[in-house]
Amino acid sequence: MSLNEVITALQNSGVEYTFKVDNKDYNPDMLVGPWSGLAVEVYKDGNLYFLLSASNRSDETITGSSEGLKVDSPLPMRCAENTYYAKGFRRDGEGLTYGSVKEQLKEYTDIMSEKSGSVLDIHGNEYQGIELRIPIKTINAGGDTSITLTFLFKAEDGACVGAYSTVLLHY
């Protein structure tokens, strides 16, 4: 679906949403360059609810309302308690620890990376912690896709405070 179709459907859903790009009101006349994209922040009741990632997969500059600006995926922000990843990992990290995640994903040890530093949980609380990443490359009809699973842990006790995935499309 085009970004325009998704925004129109949300506007006609009976729920009041607001749309922003880079903390400014979304402008459907904004320009989107060739082979690039944008992330539209969707707010409900003043809270960031999800992001709409959209891509222009052409050699032409188009506008935000163009049918050529296609939604890649919605990225949930306010529904952590209802989002699960493969193997039953919860987005909010509840019930997971550094040790349990490493054990469940031991077959990926050769591609895992870790770094210490500041981590944020899904509510924006900051902890000294560890970020564990697993990059996965896939090939599909649209081309190469890189998916990275990221888990965040508190350094003090190894409790998981969140998990998320990022998707990069290579055209």
Image: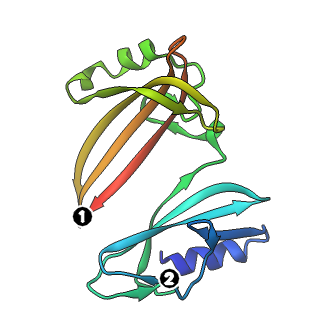
Amino acid type at circle 2 is Gly
Question: Marks 2 and 1, Cα distance to the nearest angstrom?
Answer: 24 Å
Image quarter hosting the C terminus: bottom left
Q: Would you place residue 146 above or below residue 169 in this image?
A: above
Q: Name the residue under label 2.
A: 64
Label whose residue precedes the other's in the sequence (2 or 1) = 2
Cβ atoms under marks 2 and 1 closer than 8 Å: no
> Can you tell which quarter of the image residue 45 is in?
bottom right
Which mark, residue 12?
Answer: none
Closer to the camera in the image, 25 or 57: 25
Q: Is residue 125 left or right of residue 115?
A: right
Q: Give the residue displayed 27% in from the left and 54% down from the top.
A: 145
> Can you tell which quarter of the image residue 108 is in?
top left
Residue 34 lies, in percent from the top left, at 31, 80
Which mark, residue 141?
Answer: 1
Closer to the camera in the image, 1 or 101: 101
Q: What element carries label 1?
A: loop
Residue 120 lies, in percent from the top left, at 56, 34
Q: Give the residue displayed 34% in from the left and 72% down from the top.
A: 36
Amino acid type at circle 1 is Ala
Q: Is residue 155 left or right of residue 132?
A: right
Query: Local crowd at mark 1 within 10 Å, few (<14), some, or many (≥20)?
Result: few
In front: mark 2 or mark 1? Answer: 2
Q: Give the residue displayed 72% in from the left and 77% down from the top.
A: 12
Q: Is mark 2 on a helix, strand or loop?
A: loop
Residue 14 lies, in percent from the top left, at 79, 71
Query: Local crowd at mark 2 within 10 Å, few (<14), some, or many (≥20)?
Result: many
> Can you tell which quarter of the image residue 92 is in?
top right
Q: Give the residue displayed 66% in from the left and 38% down from the top.
A: 123
